[in-house]
Amino acid sequence: MEHALVLDTDEAWEALADQYSVEWEDCNIELIRKVLARGIELSREAVDFDDMLYMPVVAGVEFDKWDVVFVDEAQDLSGIQIEMVSRMVKGG
C-alpha cells in the first residue's frame, strides 16, 4: 500500500498480533493481506466509520494545515486519528 501507516512486513503483522494477543502461528498472513486489499477496493462503493478514518490516510488525501490543532481527550485517540492530527499540523 502506497500510503500505509506501517510497512507491510511480517514483523509489523506479528507486532500487531502480539498487541491484540493473537497467536501469530494461527494467522494466515497472505489471506489477511488479501482481505485488507479487498476491503480497500470495496471502500469505493460503501464505507463504515472505521473506513472514514482509515481511507483518507491510505488514499493520501491532503489535510488542511493549521498552526495549532486542539484535541479533546487526546489520550483516547487511535493510531489512525493521531496520524490524521499530525497531518493537520503545519510542519507536521
Image: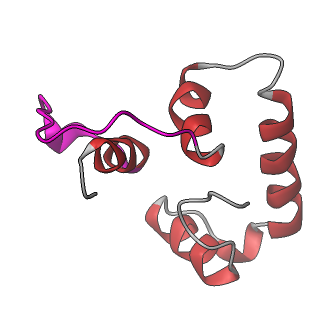
Characterize the magenta stretch by its predominant secondary structure. loop
Q: Residue at x 80, y 57 (%)?
A: 32
**Is residue 61 positioned above or below 43 on the image?**
below
Quadrant in which the N terminus is drawn = bottom right
Q: Is residue 92 left or right of residue 35?
A: left
Q: Position of residue 50 (x, y in %)?
A: 55, 29
Q: Which residue is drawn at 25% across and 58% down?
A: 91
**Is residue 42 positioned above or below 57 on the image?**
above
* 30 or 40, nearer to the observer: 40
Q: Which residue lies furthest to the bottom in this view?
A: 11
* 83 or 37, nearer to the observer: 83
* 24 or 77, nearer to the observer: 77
Confirm whether the magenta stretch covers residue 4. Answer: no
Q: What stretch is highlighted in magenta?
A: 61-79
Confirm whether the magenta stretch covers residue 70. Answer: yes
Q: Position of residue 6 (x, y in %)?
A: 55, 68
Q: Where is residue 21 in the image (x, y as percent from the top left)?
A: 50, 63
**Is residue 71 positioned above or below 14 on the image?**
above
Q: Which residue is drawn at 62% across and 36% down?
A: 55
Hey, which quadrant is residue 76 in on the image? top left
Q: Is residue 22 left or right of residue 42?
A: left
**Is residue 35 positioned above or below 26 on the image?**
above
Q: Residue at x 16, y 39 (%)?
A: 74
Hey, which quadrant is residue 68 in on the image? top left
